[in-house]
Amino acid sequence: MKKNVGTVDSMIRYVVAAALVVVGLFVLKGIQGNLTGVIVAAAAIVPALTATVKSCPLYTIVGLNTAEKK
């Protein structure tokens, strides 16, 4: 898997993931069992995973690359 997510992009993805968890669990009451809240919180897996592995399949499809050049 080719790395196409840079450091700044990765940090933004972690912030988005954290925000999705907070909104899903607390604002949308996912912690109390609200399905919408749970789904929003679970959606945080996508940006967190792509930030961790530094590769985004969507970036590959559209030809974007924010990774640092070597």
Image (tube, rainbow, N blue to C red):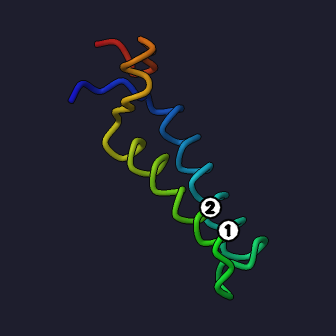
Q: Quadrant of residue 18?
A: bottom right
Kindly indicate whether the residue at mark 1 contacts the one at mark 2 (C-beta within 8 angstroms).
yes
Quarter of the image with the N terminus is top left
Question: In this image, 28 relative to 16: left or right?
Answer: right
Q: Secondary structure at mark 2?
A: helix
Q: Is residue 52 above or below residue 44?
A: above
Image x and y of residue 65, in percent:
42, 16
Q: Residue furthest left?
A: 1
Image x and y of residue 53, in percent:
31, 42
Q: Quadrant of residue 59?
A: top left
Q: Is residue 41 above or below residue 52?
A: below
* Amino acid type of the residue tagged 1 in the rendering: Thr
Give the residue number, with chain letter if any, for mark 2: 40
Few, some or many residues within 10 Å of mark 1 (<14, 14–19, 20+): some
**Residue 36 disc label:** 1
**Quick one: 66 or 44, which is closer to the camera?**
44
